[in-house]
Amino acid sequence: MKKVFVFLTLCVCATYMLAQQATPQAAQQGQQQQVQPPRPPQWNPAATEWYTPVPPKVAPGRSAGQPPSDAIILFDGTNMDKWESSRAVTERGARPDPSPWKIENGTMVIVPRSGGIQTKEYFGDCQLHIEFKSPPAENHNGQNRGNSGIFLQNTYEVQVLDGDNNETYVNGMVGSIYKQSAPSVNAYTKNGEWQVYDIYWKAPKFDSNGLIEPAQITVVLNGIVIQNHFTLKGDTPYTGLPKYTPHGRLPLSLQDHGTAVAYRNIWIRNL
């Protein structure tokens, strides 16, 4: 009986000691459970919603590449009323001559060495759609094969060139931002086929002290992004380094580089 009593006494003591050890841990856990992080403010969903201004309704083109309802049609195959010669006028106050290029089967074709053309209207930020076709390669190579250029704001060139097995410097090949950025891939198909450019242009910004925001461009050729939000270093000269010269809205121009490149389906949207 005495042994049983001693055994029970030892069990009670052991239980008491374990309880004493567990009490601080339980108390600490209880305190941790009681400390809750502050709740974020309860937002009313209406506080982050707005209803004006309502974006205007624009109807997309009926098929891929066709102009949406708010586009300015620069060439639809019927006339060149939106264009004029880019040759400098000699008389003060005179208007430039009409476009010297010709219309053939609904396309606008360069008359080599007649000079470039430019739009009568001036543009800044824009979305531009334009399609071109290189003339037969014949014996021409490099920069002499199907060369022309699309000049945003008369200053910044996206290169037009035959890209069908035509070796040249890569920052001057088709799809390049001339002398500044080679295209990420060559998306040109074949000589004699129509090539489709979609260009998204953010114009540079200037103030009285000069440049405050450089130009940026995204170029899509035949549905493939080849220039992804590229930031221009300035203009695109043939020789020398690019630089910015302050300007405002300016015409879109197309270059005559001595080859009979054809253009069609040209439209633009102000952004």
Image (tube, helix red, strand yellow):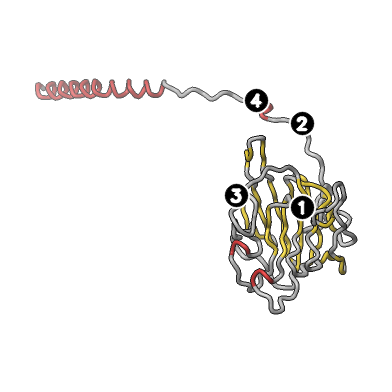
Dot 1 falls on a residue whose secondary structure is strand
Furthest-left residue in this view? 2
Distance from Cα at disc 1 to Cα at disc 4: 48 Å
Q: Which residue is mark 2?
A: 52
Between discs 1 and 4, the one toward the N terminus: 4
Q: Which residue is mark 3?
A: 233
Tell me, for residue 252, which label it has, or none.
Answer: 1
Between disc 1 and disc 2, the foreground one is 1
Find out whether the residues at labels 1 and 4 contact each other: C-beta distance under 8 Å. no
Distance from Cα at disc 1 to Cα at disc 3: 19 Å
Tell me, for residue 100, which label it has, or none.
Answer: none
Dot 3 falls on a residue whose secondary structure is loop
Image point (61%, 60%), residue name: 183
Circle 1 Cα neighbour tier, 10 Å, few/some/many (<14 / 14–19 / ≥20): many
Asked where in the image residue 184 lies, by quadrant, the reply is bottom right
Residue in front for this viewpoint, 163 or 238 = 238
Between discs 4 and 2, the one toward the N terminus: 4
Distance from Cα at disc 1 to Cα at disc 2: 33 Å
Distance from Cα at disc 3 to Cα at disc 2: 37 Å
Between discs 3 and 2, the one toward the N terminus: 2
Say which quadrant the C terminus sits in. Answer: top right
Image point (87%, 50%), residue name: 94
Find out whether the residues at labels 3 and 4 contact each other: C-beta distance under 8 Å. no
Between discs 1 and 3, the one toward the N terminus: 3
